[in-house]
Image: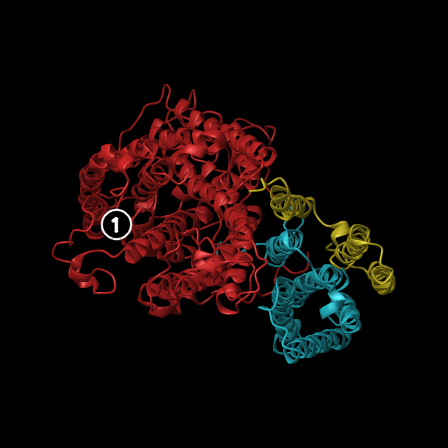
Amino acid sequence: MDENHEVTHHEEEHHQELGFWRKYVFSVDHKVIGIQYAVTGLVFLFFGFCLMLLMRWQLAYPGQPLPVIGKLFGGDRMPGGIMLPEFYNQLGAMHGTIMVFLGVVPLAVGGFGNFVLPLQIGAPDMAFPRLNMASYWSYFIGGVVMFLSFFAPGGAAQSGWTSYPPLSIIADSGQTVWLLGMVFLITSSLLGSVNFIVTVVQLRVEGLTFMRMPFFVWSQFVTAFLLLLAFPPLEAAAFMQLMDRVADTSFFMPAGLVISGQVAEVSGGGSPLLWQHLFWFLAHPEVYVLILPAMGIVAEIIANNTRKPLWGYKSMVYSILFLAFMSFIVWAHHMFLTGMGTFMSSFFQTTTMIISIPSVIIITALLLSLWGGSIRFNTPMLFALAFLPMFGIGGLTGLPLGLAAADIHLHDTYYVIGHFHYVVAPGTIFALFAGVYYWYPKATGRRMSEFLGKLHFWPSLLFMNGVFMPMFIQGLAGVQRRLFDGGASYAHAEPVLFLNKVMTHSAWGLAIAQLPFIINFFLSLKRGKVVDSNPWQATTLEWLAPSPPPHGNFASVPVAYRGPYEYSVPGEDSDYHPQFEPDRVASGPRDPGEPGATPATA
Amino acid sequence: MSAEAIPYTVDVRPDTGLNNVKLGMWLFLASEVMLFGALFAGYILLRVGGEQWPAGREYLNVPLATLNTVVLITSSVTMVMSWASLLRKNFGKFRLYMGGTVVLGVVFLIIKYIEYTSKFDHHLYPSTNTFLAIYFTLTALHGLHVIGGMAVNAYLWGPGAKMWKTAPQQFTNRVEAAGLFWHFVDLVWIFLFPVLYLL
Amino acid sequence: MTSHDTADIDKHVRTYILVFVSLMALTLVTVAVAYLDLGVAAGIGVALLIASVKGSLVACFFMHLIDERKLIYTVLAFTVFFFLAVLLLPVITQANAVEI
């Protein structure tokens, strides 16, 4: 190889001279970018949460003025503090969009992925640092665009996060802004996923074979493939919807459409179902994008806090690969009620049932990993443990939805909302909280308060269930979703209407329960207990680097000597043997493939 | 190599046989396959669902598009020849072939411009019917990719070529990656042309 | 493809020329066949077949896919599968749909 001494042009050789802007704002360091994603993501999670609180007021007290702050929203949205249906619809569409695309994924993938992944594979940074920076800023711009859409004439997008035509085509300009925002977000995602995949494939250090990678790395790697291949069809569909809205095309507008008594002046010949197919082609893999990083985080924390290897690591890896593959061919279970014939609904029902298997394998493996463990019940572990039954409820309630016959009754009811919120709220978001508590010491050099952590955990667990469990009851009773009055105008909903108040009061409890977290997050920056590089006595490579790691991460390139979860190895003194530590006992030449063997020197 | 430099930016990683840029470009192209795939899926659904579907030649200029096909294929040849020239360490030839690629790209866009304006002159717009809607959308998205590819190629022909002096292998890799993108743009057109114009 | 000795490159260049000529010929064939008016189904079949051949030539030889790494093949294989899924499943679902 003749290019060893070639100067590669994007090296920040003189990084010590970087000014404030290049160091903290327009940084190419994966750790800075990861924190940018995480903080921005948390801010949007908070904003999306506030949108939900507004909605829940309307659902519990329909037509009542919102005290104190209601009038601040103005006559277009809440005249006299009373919510207009149009504003409720904006809140609904934007709550979903913001939580999924601006909150959870940027935190789970952009935040945790960017910060932890290079460290866990021993790399100095991502494969393409400048592309990484571009990804973040594309996301940021998309986020600003989405936020500003509330101020468009007619308000923000209000056709659901699913933006079904023809309604989304005739909606006000906020929908166009939504589409433009999505283009920025999708671009960010595509650039990021290329970066993640190349990083994992190419930058793993010596000794870190694929089957020695932490499960967290696998989860990010597979997620990146989902984003890479599933997002482009939504981008194409977004262009088509933009064309329909702006250039009067009829991609999604059928012939003979009559709107408010007027025949629509379009050429017709389009198909609203075309949008649904392309949207759900992305949106189904998207839900696995929402859950896989969470499973990765939980796996790390469980292994660490049981002081045992993960049970069934190999089966978890094969499961996650199979799951990713299947996720591309299940999407039309979101479309069972669109007039599908029995052959195709059977096809999608079958693939949907099959895809539940790998999820069960992964959760079972995590559960079995607890057996015989020396469990440490610190805050990250509490959230990780809670994830298991919460995701369990979310996953199991998905089964009737995947069965076409049962879905006839449950589609577009509150049952669906309960199902997906269980998976993503006490599911993914709990895992993300766990991740924050777990990796905060690595990022900041300080631990968060355990007391405040537990004060955050227990009420959150209680109130999450308080908000979402009643939704199954309402859904089974036939209460539809996206109803501005929460079902008040339907006789059949009357017996379960009181649950709206239960859920809203739980949401207030949930809001208050987040205060210890917010306080803890900021207070610990200054007052948290200072830690060394490995406060959790963990085994994976990120715990070799200092806390926080400097630019370039490691003083010298690490080597991986063994698998990722060598906890409580029989015969050893310590209850953990990190991947980055050479063998403790000199035992002569051994087969390089054997676990625990020192790799041959280059 | 210090712990800070990113490995395999230029060198090939032994077990994968790839450098970062090449792998990155192929992954990006995979996503582009899905992007155009979705538009083709739209074409299929709209055509099958529509009552009548015009033949391409009813609205579109087949001879001009055939010429454009020839132009784009030729530009693919000049592109790969520009890379081969770098392998042969012939910078002059590289400049010639890459320049040719850029020029041919310009020709393609000019022909496209003529096509589009002729449509508009005849009051044929994307809003006229779904055939024209998908025609304009597919060719416009493809056209945007042509513009993007040309911008990169022009940069590599011009200011970017300075890298040949300081880091020839890295520069060659960049030209190769740009070539992969350009060939992909050609590949999409190879399918676009018969689907829209001839069927 | 890390070693590029002169003979190697010359061979590749010869291939490029050959492929170029084939692509030109196939382009003319595509257009000619279109004017034969074979009917819709056959017309689509032939056009896509020729396009696939042309596309394969560009991919295999200009993009050097023919001697690429297994990893690239794997990524592309899955991509092709998902491409076919997005291309075909919607229209099949539509065909299977219930007439209201």
Q: Up-down: is A199 above or below B159?
A: above
Spot occupied by residue B113 in the image (x, y as percentages of width and height): 66, 78
Residue A127 appears in the picture as rendered: yes
* Quarter of the rendering occupied by the C terminus of chain A: top right
Q: Quarter-wise, where is residue C5 in the image?
A: bottom right
- How many marks the image carries: the answer is 1
The N terminus of chain A lies in which quarter of the figure? bottom right
Read off the residue under disc 1.
Answer: A55
Position of A205 compared to A41: left or right? right
**Chain holding disc 1:** A
Q: Residue at x 67, y 68 (%)?
A: B168
Q: Position of residue A589 (x, y in %)?
A: 59, 29
Chain ID, red in image: A
Q: Nearer the viewer, residue B141 or A383?
A: B141
Which coloring applies here? by chain
Residue placed most toward the observer, A318 or A548: A318
Estimate the x, y position of residue A287 in percent, counting from the top left.
Answer: 45, 42
Q: Amino acid at mark 1?
A: Met
Secondary structure beneath dot 1 equals helix
Identify the colour of chain C in the image: yellow
Is residue B113 depicted above or below A558 in this figure?
below
Residue A309 seen in the figure:
no
- Which hue is chain B drawn in? cyan
Q: Residue furthest front?
A: A261
Q: Position of residue A103 (x, y in %)?
A: 36, 51
The foreground one among A515 and C34 is C34
Mark 1 crowd level (few <14, some 14–19, many ≥20, 10 Å Cα): many
Residue at the image point whose x is 25% and y is 57% from the top:
A84
